[in-house]
């Protein structure tokens, strides 16, 4: 059974086909996210990308917002209001012709990297800040930590470390903000492991603090297979 994993991001839509062990059996392809990123043009890009993916038996989709039972409720880094109440799971199943599951993108990537032991948090630094929390391998769904206020100016975690802030404040200050976010989460959740990924994780310098691990996008995409083993 091959699983097609799709990652819908604020700047790009990525797709890869994986075998039962989560190993890639196709090249990862990427297309720019259409603007405006409303459901119809996003689905049109996905449909065109499907043509190059060969044979697969099911589809896993990571979406940058709150997802409940395959329906999207928020999409702050896409065309936000256009995704409220949209049944993305049914829409992708219709255009692919395969069983489909849709999950928040950070939550899906987390399934590809966590150990399944203790309290584990996943952060993805991209257009915004994706977050996921697991306890002994079980997901605590729709925990949008990125939108929680941090500091005395009313800014959220995401406001401080989102993509446009890397250039706006410089990498040194941005890294200090990342350290503040990670340290705050440590004091709140006392996590056993924190995983950092996404396009901007490359700006986080080594050595990483104890208990913090960086992962690449390819590893996160393996969550598309693990998703089907986690009901």
Image: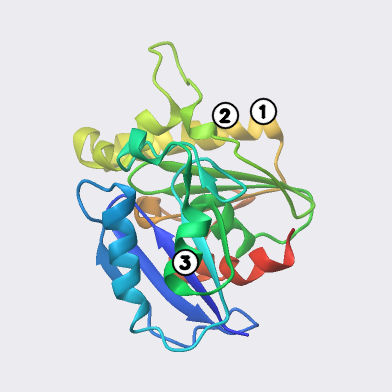
Where the C terminus falls, by quadrant? bottom right
Decide which of 10, 95 is in the foreground and name it.
Answer: 95
Q: Which one is earlier in the sequence, the residue at label 3 or at label 2?
A: 3
Figure check: 136 above or below 53: above
Foreground tag (3 vs 2): 3
115 left or right, relative to 219: right
Foreground tag (1 vs 3): 3
- Residues at badges 3 and 2 in contact (C-beta under 8 Å)? no
What residue do we see at 52% from left, 57% from top? 89
Secondary structure beneath disc 1?
Answer: helix
Quarter of the image holding residue 80?
top left
Which residue bears the numbered disc 1?
188
Tell me how far mark 2 sits from mark 1, CA to CA: 6 Å
What residue do we see at 60% from left, 36% from top? 143
Question: Is residue 207 in view from this perspective?
Answer: no
What residue do we see at 52% from left, 58% from top? 90
Which residue bears the numbered disc 3?
94
Which residue bears the numbered disc 2?
184
């Amino acid at each position: 059974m091959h699983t097609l994993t799709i990652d819908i991001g604020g700047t790009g839509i990525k797709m890869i086909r994986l075998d039962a062990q989560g190993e890639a059996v196709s090249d990862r392809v990427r297309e720019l996210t259409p603007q405006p990123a409303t459901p119809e043009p996003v689905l049109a890009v996905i449909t065109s990308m499907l043509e190059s993916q060969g044979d697969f038996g099911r589809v896993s989709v990571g979406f940058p917002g709150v997802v409940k039972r395959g329906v999207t409720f928020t999409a702050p880094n896409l065309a936000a209001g256009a995704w409220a109440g949209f049944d993305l799971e049914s829409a992708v199943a219709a255009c692919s012709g395969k069983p489909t599951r849709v999950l928040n993108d950070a939550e899906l990537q987390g399934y590809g990297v966590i150990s399944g032991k203790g309290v584990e948090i996943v952060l993805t630094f991209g257009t915004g800040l994706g977050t996921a929390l697991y306890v002994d391998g079980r997901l605590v769904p729709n925990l949008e930590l990125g939108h929680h206020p941090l500091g005395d100016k009313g800014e959220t975690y995401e406001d401080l470390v989102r993509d446009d802030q890397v250039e706006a404040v410089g990498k040194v200050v941005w890294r200090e903000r990342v350290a503040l976010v990670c340290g705050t989460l440590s004091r709140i959740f006392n996590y056993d492991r924190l995983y950092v990924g996404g396009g901007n994780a490359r700006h986080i310098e080594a050595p990483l603090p104890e208990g913090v691990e960086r992962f690449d996008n390819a590893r996160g995409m393996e969550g598309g297979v693990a998703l089907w083993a986690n009901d």
